[in-house]
Each structure stands twice: as structure tokens, then as C-alpha cells.
Amino acid sequence: MHFSLIFALLWFFYVIMRPYRIYMKKREYKLKKQIFRNLCRFLVFILMFSCFFVFGKKVSANENQNAAPIITYYRLNGNDITIQWKAPDGVSYSKVDIYSATSPNGSYRYENTVSGNSYTNTYVAKGVPYYYKLEASYEDNEGYKTVTTYAGKCIINPLPAPSSLEASTGNSHSITVKWKASDDCDGYQIYRSVSPDGNYELVQTVSNESRSSWWYDDDDESFQTYTQKNLELGKIYYYKIRPYTTYIDETFYGDFSNYISCQVTINGTKVKSASSKKKKINTITWAKNDEADGYIVYYSKKEDGNYTKLKTFTSRNNLSYTHTKLTNGTAYYYKIQAYKNFNGGKLYGPMTPYLKYCDYYSYADESYESRCRRAFGKSYYADYKSAKQAKKHMKTITVKVWDKKGKKKYTRKFRITVNKGLAPSIKEMFKEIYKSKERFPIHEIGCYSWRGKNSSSEHCEGLAFDINSNENYMIQGKKVLAGSFWKPKKNRYSIPLNCKLVKILEKYGFHRGLWGSRRDYMHFSYFGG
């Protein structure tokens, strides 16, 4: 500013003195013309002086801006953004106001005020671009001032693309897309194409269910699904998904996932019923599928295990299959797959596992409902109200067992009255006991015994046995309630805790009456009572 003032004074002196020199040389004829020129020069001087004055003010503003913070560190750390700065030499800030925006020329919002030389924005939203500016306040001999620094580049905490994509066909000519969900976004956009590198069109925007409710698969991971129905049969569709998040009324998008493809196929078929009408077999029947040209039957002993093909039917009218040579009490899982001949290949319908125990006879792991249906023909335990009613549901059967006289074992027969629904199982159970190498001696068997309508004993329903009652007593603590003793190592009729007889009884679902302090060593019951 001082240099411009000196220059202006010199120019003014030159302009004033020039007419005098002309006059002294007696060039009066040019005086008027020269005065006009000098007037123009004076106006130019005024204009130049104004420019220098304004320029001098700009220099002053730049000198003031040189006091702005100098950013020394600006980056993402995990889910946080950290900014560090320093003041130029000789400048000390009283405070620094922090502002952020989602675009360089956007509206900057106030975030915080700090007195130090660093600021951390904790857990910034993923997928949102952050731009920062710092307004630093300080005081010098001219007064209180504020200077601004812009961080320049944006920082984004990446919003990752969905992972673990799966696609599966379903009924109603549908495709279901499944992906691993994240609580970092507000939702997802699903895009679809008819070729892997074709034009993908937005088909649906879905909210992020993982933010409100979580459902888990076998690996305890959160997944989300989207289903499209009524698609073109036999056509292959390709899907991509990208997440989005909303921040201050703006929507920001993450990266697209890799594509996943699936072919639209025919509807599946359902198992209608399954039964074990004879021992060692299961008969499965299913619903007719009018789209199908045939069916394939599979089975496995584990729901998520490897399934073995049992039979392929080439007609949609074949609706049952009998599986033979099975083991009683074993769980079998069946899948019936409908298929349709299509363009030289096959379209396969979806399958759902169906559990069916081989249960012509009772078994150890039989469910409570299955036990009730076997014993009472109902899904619940049905107490009989009288001996007359109970006898209608009983059947007398003959069983062979081993007994012992001296050192010799011999066969004897007992006629016992049992629950009609359990009669086939009980006959098979004692048949297996008789054939076992153990040949445990039995000299007494009791089953059905009416003990009153208020009794909780399963003997009233013909569902409990007392075997060798005198040698296998019932006690409460040390008090003997029935029988005389229990000496499995000394007496031939005392039944040990773990012998072949006990194992066979348990195999058919009859468990020993050991209830805490009350122990009934003679007693074996179907419902454990």
C-alpha cells in the first residue's frame, strides 16, 4: 500500500509541472491542448490510485487468511473420521468450529466446537461422503477475527455390497433371492436382467429388516430375502443387489453385488401322507402335479444329509412309493421332486423334506403325540373313566419267555392283557427278549390292572408292566412299598439296571420306574408313569 501511494505522488508531481515547462518555453499555442491532455492523465491517475488501493486491501485479506488452520491429518479410522491441524507461527486460536457437508459446494452443517487441535467424528454413517471446513477464531492487535480452512477431499466410510447371495426357485413360478444382511444400511435395491452382462433394471426397493428384527440360519448369521412370482417358465433371470442409506434427506448407494442367476421351474409337489402299515416299510403318497411329466423319490436318514434316489416315475399319475427293508424306530426323510421335460432337458420343482419314522412298532424316541395316537387314537392322553371302558381297549396276547429251574432254563408262556394299540409292539418286544442270548428268567408278568378312575397308574390303560415283582421291589427312600427285595447280583429274578432285558424294553419305549427317591424296580411304562 505504501509503494502505491509514493507512485501516485510522483505521477501527480509530473502532471502538475509539465504545463509550467511548456509555458516557460513560450509554447502558448499548445497550452490549451496540453491542459486537456493533463486533465485526462489526471483522471487516469485517479483510476490507478483506486486500483492500487483496492489491491492493497486484497493483499491485506490474504495476509489475514494466512492465519487459517493447516490440516496435518485427515482420514478414516475404522468407523471414525479424525482431523488434526496446527496454527501458523504466531497465531493462537481461541476456538475452532467444525462443519460438515455431503458435497464440496453443499450446505455445511455445524457439528462441534473444540479448543484443541484435533476433532473426531465417531461412527460416521457408511456410504455417506463427508466434506469438512474449520472456522478458527483468534485475536490480534486489529481485533477479533475468523479464518476458514476447507479439508478439500471427501472421506467415505464404504457401504459394502451384499454378500453370500443365493437364488432358488419355488412354487408359483417364483425366484427367491437371499443375501447376508447388515445393519449398516437402510435398505436394498434389487435389480434384474435376462443376461449376465445385460441391462439391469430396478425391480424392487426393500427396507432393511435386520434393523428391526433378526432371523438366523444354522450359522447364526442374519439373512434377508426377496421373492418374485409369476415369472416366465424355463427362463433364466440374473439379479444384483446394492444397499442404500439415507442421511439428512439424501440417499447414498453402496456397490452392486456380483450377480446371481436362477431358472424358473415348475411347482413342487407335497407329501400327503405316510404310514407304516406293515413292519419294516414306509409307504409315501403325494399330491398330483399337473405341470409335471414325472417324479423322483429320494430319502436320507438326516434332514440335511445326502439324499439317495429311490425311484423315478415317468408319469404324473404315479403318486405313491413303498420303501422296504427299514429299521423300526428309525427316522427317514423323504423328498418328492416333480420334473418336466423342457427344451431337451428337465425343469425340476422345489423339494421339501418330509419326516417319517418307521413306526409299525413303538420305539424309544417316539414323540408324546405319536404315543397318544398309538395308544388312544387321539393326539392327547385319554384316561379311561371305568373298568368297562378300559376293557374295550384291551387285548389279551400270549408271549413266550425264559424261566429257570435249578441250573436249567426252560420256555414258559404267559397270557397278558395289554392296550390294544400296543399289542403288536408288545408281542414283537417279547419275541426279541425271548430270542436274545441273555435269556433272562421271568416267572411273573403283570400289565393291565384297573385301579380306579382317579388312579394315575398306567396299569389302568394297559401301558405298564410289572416283571418279577417280589424280587424287584418298590421303595420310597428306605421304606419298602411293594415286593420284598432287589438283589441283582444274588438273585436270578432281580433285574439289573443295565441288562439286555432292560435295553429291549427301552428300545420299544418302555422305561423303568426310577423317580428320584421312589424307585420301582419291577415297573416299566410307556409314558414313564
Image: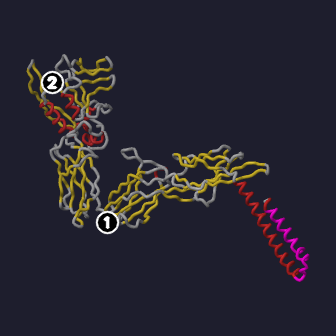
- Circle 1 residues within 10 Å: few <14, some 14–19, many ≥20: few
Question: How would you rate the neighbour count of disc 2 (Cα within 10 Å): few for under 14, some for 14-19, many for 20 or more?
Answer: some
Amino acid type of disc 2?
A: His
Depth check, mark 2 against mark 1: the one in front is 1
Residue at far front of view: 25
- Horizontal and vertical percent for residue 517? 33, 22
Can residue 54 be seen here? The reply is: yes
Work out whether 408 lies above or below 79. Answer: above
Is 6 magenta? The answer is yes
Quarter of the image for the C terminus: give it: top left
Q: Position of residue 50 (x, y in %)?
A: 79, 67
Of the two numbered discs 2 and 1 on the same chain, state the one appearing first in sequence. 1
Task: Give the residue type that dot 1 points to.
Answer: Lys
Which residue is denoted by mark 1 in the rendering?
235
Q: Which residue is mark 2?
A: 443
Magenta residues, start to end? 4-29
On the picture, is 98 further left or further right than 515?
right
Q: Is residue 249 magenta?
A: no
Q: Nearer the viewer, residue 243 or 10?
A: 10
What is the x, y in percent for residue 451?
27, 30
Q: Nearer the viewer, residue 417 or 280?
A: 280
Relative placement, left or right, of 103 versus 52 is left
Secondary element at image label 1: loop
Instruction: Say whether residue 459 is visible.
Output: no
* Label 2 element class: loop
Q: Residue at x 24, y 17 (%)?
A: 485
Q: Residue at x 31, y 33 (%)?
A: 453
Tell me what residue is drawn at x 21 percent, y 60 percent: 294
Q: Where's residue 268, x and y in %?
A: 28, 58
- In the displayed structure, 126 sits above or below 453; it is below
Disc 2 to disc 1, how far (Cα)?
A: 73 Å
